[in-house]
Image (spheres, rainbow, N blue to C red):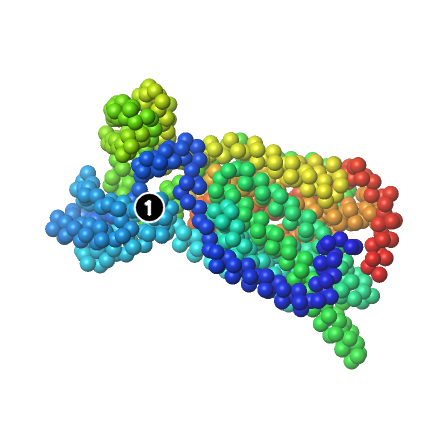
């Protein structure tokens, strides 16, 4: 009872207003400093991985990197029917079209963001004119610059109402996707916050007590956003940090507060007024407070393994999660005891006034051991072996779809067509199929070999032109120092098609070794969208064993630290693996097929986003420790109090079941709200985390874990022998509380 957790709670309970003011100042300081230093966003170079990344770096060295481009389509307004893809069948009036293109070109060339405006290109049927505009600077900077181009496109559209003038491109699509994501997040907040509040109202039966977890979670999120801005100067933000802070922050922030609050109310109901508010807060800190700290550290340690993936997006996700979890733990150790003290003292004063007037005070329910949970635990208590086998087999059945798992990098083609630029992108692909995909071959060689390199690149272009996977387009460029050269080749297939992937394979493994590969001292690589979408999953597969090995080790060590039991450490690893694999199998069953498209409002790509499985395993392993630590802590308390091992398991699970269920419902609500997002990867992440939490809370922690512990008996605590120290530990705790 003299741990750091208890000492912090004791100080906060003794100086509640100082603690609350200090917490508010901390939150304001985090936001203030974060706003002052700003966010260091990831640069183009931060995303480079694999061969495609090497090619882009080589091109950048020779100032031959491809600029970000926007495409503006000029066509006649559709009058009646439309061709598939939304392309108008109306003939283009040459006079107005030429005038619009001339005005568009003049406007674009005046913009400081524009590097070049190409001559207009006509579609094969002559009904659409396309003007390509190149932007200055890095590819990622184009997202901030494209607004000026879109404004000029709209101005030309207003000046020529008889025509259809539309813009698309990587930057305009990205900007539209960002706006859609922001709108989706606002919608998810509107869904998750009220449902969370209603759930807490049901749990506590008091609006004041229900508001406490929500307010602390929101304050933790605010502080974490400010700290994440500061942390971005150590690990650049990939634009997903705020998303994960909102998702994880609300989930764990409410959960940690809920664990603490429920324990304080349980002890208050149990003591029947014999202990004061400060003593109850200390008791909650010594039990649930310790569980919150261990759970938070487990989430942090598990999430930190994402840094081993050497990927800027995973690093950004890890930073956001680590920061918000640490802040949530800090709020539960400082602000929460202070709030409980203020509310507890007010409740005591109200109870005394009622007693003075002869009115009975409302008794608090200890909760956690009702008939419902007794019935739910009955199979594990009476038939542990059968319950363990049946539950495990059910989860293994959900694992089976993993045999058909297909992982792909979610490309621009997977974006929602609710984004206007994506609909124009579809028109562009339909009208100009020869421009759908571009491969860029980059070669570095001694300057003396420049002529030989150029000759071999032209030979490569001739080979590709004879291949039906390529068009006859070829563009060779050489750097000013003659040490770098590039060749651009086009493919008339969509970037996510098998033909586009085959063209990359032919280029890398057949054409390049037979041509440029003959040049002595030459280094070469291929980049482009298809190369990026191919190389990233391969890069991740190479890092997967390292990340998973570290994750399993961290989970084992954290469980060992929490309970001093090797058996529980191994059991925790196995159960987490089973839960995560079953959840991923369920994800495959839903998202790799089309039967749930209408239900969840998505278009199946026949695959799972390349970042989803690893993110699921890492985050779920951390979040599962919430329930693992809380449930096993209650069991351990009973064992230390001298309760027989079998009875301790049933009693510990029953007492913790209601709070674990409430926490799971709240966390599931937060994750389910992300299923309503348009971005397919975020939708998959929200779904799989929600499914994982439900499986973990209702199957693993209520059926499998107690069954396994009942079968293991005292062997579950090896090498610790808690029964031998039970009397000493119990007496010590009673003395400290008294």
Q: Quadrant of the C terminus?
A: bottom right
Side of 388 relative to 96 (left or right): right
The image shows residue 292 at horizontal and vertical percentages of: 68, 52
Q: Residue at x 30, y 27 (%)?
A: 447
The image shows residue 298 at horizontal and vertical percentages of: 65, 45
Q: How many marks?
A: 1
Residue denoted by label 1:
137
The image shows residue 584 at horizontal and vertical percentages of: 55, 39
Residue lying farthest bottom? 357
- 11 is higher (above) or lower (below) than 301: below
The answer to whether one can see residue 637 in this image is yes
Side of 697 relative to 148 (left or right): right
Camera-side residue of 597 and 153: 153
Side of 273 relative to 140 (left or right): right
Q: Quadrant of the N terminus?
A: bottom right
Where residue 387 sits, quadrant-wise, is top right
The image shows residue 569 at horizontal and vertical percentages of: 71, 38
Q: Residue at x 23, y 29 (%)?
A: 472
Q: Residue at x 47, y 31 (%)?
A: 538
Where residue 500 sits, quadrant-wise, is top left
- 625 is higher (above) or lower (below) than 283: above
Q: Secondary structure at mark 1?
A: loop
The answer to whether one can see residue 705 in this image is no
Camera-side residue of 670 and 435: 435
Camera-side residue of 565 and 46: 46
Camera-side residue of 126 and 303: 303
Q: Residue at x 32, y 23 (%)?
A: 516
Crowd band around label 1 with a 10 angstrom C-alpha radius: few (<14), some (14–19), many (20+) = some
């Amino acid at each position: 009872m003299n741990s750091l957790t208890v000492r912090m709670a004791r100080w906060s309970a003794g100086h509640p207003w100082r603690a609350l003011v200090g917490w508010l100042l901390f939150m304001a300081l985090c936001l203030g400093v974060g706003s002052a230093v700003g966010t260091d966003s990831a640069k183009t170079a931060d995303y480079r991985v694999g061969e495609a990344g090497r090619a882009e770096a080589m091109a950048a060295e020779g100032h031959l990197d491809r600029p970000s481009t926007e495409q503006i389509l000029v066509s006649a307004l559709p009058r009646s029917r439309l061709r598939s893809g939304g392309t108008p069948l109306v003939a283009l009036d040459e006079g107005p079209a030429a005038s619009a293109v001339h005005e568009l070109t003049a406007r674009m060339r005046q913009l400081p963001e524009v590097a070049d405006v190409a001559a207009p290109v006509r579609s094969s049927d002559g009904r659409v004119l396309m003007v390509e505009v190149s932007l200055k600077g890095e590819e990622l900077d184009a997202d901030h610059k494209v607004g000026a181009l879109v404004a000029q496109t709209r101005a030309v559209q207003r000046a020529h109402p008889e025509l259809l003038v539309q813009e698309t491109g990587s930057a305009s699509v990205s900007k539209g996707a960002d706006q859609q994501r922001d709108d989706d997040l606002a919608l998810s907040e509107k869904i998750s916050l009220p449902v969370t509040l209603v759930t807490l109202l049901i749990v506590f039966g008091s609006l004041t007590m229900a508001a406490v977890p929500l307010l602390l979670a929101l304050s933790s999120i605010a502080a974490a956003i400010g700290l994440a801005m500061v942390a971005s100067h150590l690990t650049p933000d990939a634009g997903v940090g705020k998303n994960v802070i909102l998702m994880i922050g609300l989930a764990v922030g409410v959960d940690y507060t809920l664990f603490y609050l429920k324990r304080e109310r349980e002890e208050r109901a149990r003591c029947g007024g014999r202990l004061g508010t400060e003593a109850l807060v200390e008791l909650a800190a010594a039990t649930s407070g310790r569980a919150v700290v261990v759970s938070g550290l487990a989430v942090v340690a598990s999430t930190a393994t994402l840094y081993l993936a050497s990927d800027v997006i995973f690093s950004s996700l890890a930073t956001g999660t680590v920061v918000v979890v640490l802040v949530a733990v800090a709020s539960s150790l400082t602000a929460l005891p202070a709030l409980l003290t203020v509310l507890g003292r007010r409740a005591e004063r109200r109870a005394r006034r009622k007693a003075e007037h002869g009115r009975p005070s409302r008794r608090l329910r200890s909760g956690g051991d009702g008939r419902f949970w007794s019935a739910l635990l009955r199979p594990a208590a009476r038939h542990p072996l059968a319950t363990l086998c049946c539950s495990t087999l059910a989860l293994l059945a959900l694992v089976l779809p993993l045999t058909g798992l297909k992982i792909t990098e979610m490309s621009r083609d997977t974006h929602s067509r609710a984004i206007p630029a994506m609909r124009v992108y579809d028109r562009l692909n339909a009208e100009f199929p020869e421009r759908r995909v571009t491969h860029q071959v980059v070669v570095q060689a001694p300057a003396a070999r420049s002529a030989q390199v150029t000759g071999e690149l032209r030979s490569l272009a001739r080979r590709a032109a004879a291949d039906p996977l390529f068009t006859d387009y070829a563009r060779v460029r050489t750097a000013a120092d003659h040490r770098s050269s590039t060749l651009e080749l086009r493919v008339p297939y969509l970037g996510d098609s098998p033909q586009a992937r085959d063209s990359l394979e032919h280029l890398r493994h057949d054409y390049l070794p037979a041509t440029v590969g003959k040049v002595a001292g030459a280094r070469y690589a291929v980049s482009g969208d298809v190369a990026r979408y191919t190389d990233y999953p391969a890069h991740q597969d190479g890092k997967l064993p390292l990340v998973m090995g570290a994750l399993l080790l961290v989970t084992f060590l954290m469980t060992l630290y929490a309970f001093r039991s090797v058996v529980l450490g191994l059991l925790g690893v196995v159960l987490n693996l089973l839960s995560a694999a079953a959840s991923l199998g369920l994800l495959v069953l839903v998202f790799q097929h089309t039967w749930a498209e209408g239900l969840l409002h998505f278009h199946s790509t026949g695959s799972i986003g390349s970042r989803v499985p690893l993110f699921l395993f890492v985050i779920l392993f951390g979040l599962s420790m919430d329930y693992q630590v809380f449930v096993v802590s209650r069991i351990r308390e009973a064992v230390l109090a001298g309760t027989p091992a079998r009875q301790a398991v049933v009693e510990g699970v029953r007492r913790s079941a209601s709070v674990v269920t409430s926490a799971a419902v709240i966390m599931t609500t937060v994750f389910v709200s992300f299923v309503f997002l348009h971005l397919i990867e975020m939708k998959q992440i929200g779904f799989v985390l929600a499914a994982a939490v439900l499986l973990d809370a209702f199957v693993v922690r209520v059926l499998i874990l107690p069954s396994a512990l009942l079968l293991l008996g005292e062997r579950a605590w090896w090498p610790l022998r808690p029964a031998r120290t039970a009397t000493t530990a119990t007496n010590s705790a009673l003395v400290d509380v008294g």
